[in-house]
Image: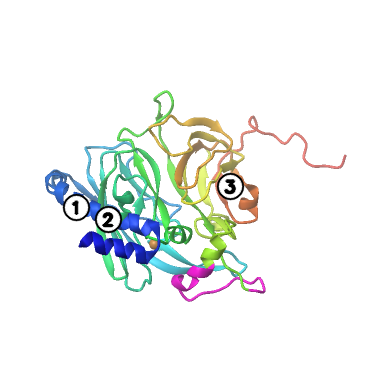
Amino acid sequence: MTSLSFSRRTVLAGAAIAGAMTQVRQAAAETKAVLTPASATDIAQLPRQKVKLVDPPFVHEHEQVATGGPKVVEFEMTIQEKKITLDNSGATYWASTFNGTVPGPLMVVHEGDYLELTLINPDTNELMHNIDFHASTGALGGGGLTQINPGEKCVLRWKATKPGVFVYHCAPPGMVAFHVVSGMNGAVMVLPREGLKGREGEPVHYDKVFYIGEQDFYVPRDADGNWKNYDSAGESYEDVVKVMRTLTPTHVVFNGAVGALTGDNAMKAKVGETVAFIHSQANRDTRPHLIGGHGNYVWATGKFGNPPERGLETWFIPGGTAGMMVYTFEQPGIYAYVNHNLIEAFELGAAAHVVVEGEWNNDLMTQVLAPSPI
Ligand SMILES: [Cu+2]
């Protein structure tokens, strides 16, 4: 009888993905009933660590080389549907967010740890949400076990078996793309227990780490070409989907708005500091570039089981992927960190600044003649 009613619901939903999700959720629930008791005993012995998440581009404190054995790392995120301002031309958008930010916070664990997330959908929200962790295994990345309506919460635990940086995103049946381009995505970093390694096995250590989430937005305009405003995410849905289907974003931004990482909000570093930049794009391809610097170590597709590329000018991150670049700054000044589709960087918003303090190195660059009359 259950399968009959699920089939009927599938037909009514009219979306293939909804059917797939429902079946996986059911299958996952059955599997869980068989497997949970045995492994739960072992997991209950592990130490637990509660981590408070911080807003991007910052990342919660973490060890790069793990001390001790695997543990259960507990995180909590509250989903917030909220109207955000995208630029200073008056473009607003009803974003769906993990923990109130676009992107959601970066979570860091080590290979072999268990990530345990409490996900809360307050009743002030309007939509059903869930979470698909690309770093996890099974049940649509957890999407099939985390569908929560407003007023509900759930707890998902998964074992981090693949080292790397990985996207997570919301993926509710029938509305996956809308939720992802409404800002509901973030990233997880699963560090090797012994820390990062270069091509010859040399340790790669960073002094600081920034998390940049690139987001394409599709903001509807009215007949006069003005940005449209809405009272809720649900109300905006039909119009946004029409713009989405043009595949032409109105905004491509870092961390939720044009200028979110420039000027007073610029990232900061010092000459001699090694900085890791984690960059995710849950939907579209991107090609990060640090103007005036390089990618000393680049895991463009973000997976630490592969050797990093070295000394890159620009690297390619396919949509649905998080990547990582590590650079040691050698000169002071303002660096622009951009998507090197320069139309997306300078017309649509995908640009950030890194302000670097320190001593200028004349050997690396010298202005031999300042601009002067011929
Ligand atoms: Cu969602």
Residue position for label 2: 25
**Label 1 or label 2, whichever comes before in sequence order:** 2
Residue at the spot 55% in from the left edge and 56% down from the top edge: 253
Q: Specify start and end residues of the magenta stretch as a single range.
A: 223-239
Q: Tell me the CA gap for discs 3 and 2.
A: 39 Å
Indicate if the residue with disc 2 has its beta carbon within 8 Å of ligand 1: no
Question: Toward the viewer: 47 or 185?
Answer: 185
Estimate the x, y position of residue 57 in percent, counting from the top left. 46, 52
- Mark 3 residue crowding within 10 angstroms, few (<14) / some (14–19) / many (20+): many
| Residue 234, magenta (yes or no) | yes
For badge 1, the amino acid type reads Glu
Front residue of 93 and 56: 93
In screen coordinates, is 181 left or right of 122?
Answer: right
Between discs 3 and 2, the one toward the N terminus: 2
Give coordinates of residue 49: x percent, y percent. 23, 49
Q: Which mark is residue 338?
A: 3
Q: Amino acid at mark 2?
A: Arg
Of the four image quadrants, the one with ligand 1 is: bottom left
Q: Quadrant of the N terminus?
A: bottom left
Residue bearing the label numbered 1: 30
The residue depicted at 69 percent of the width and 34 percent of the height is 366
Marks 1 and 2, how far apart in space?
A: 9 Å
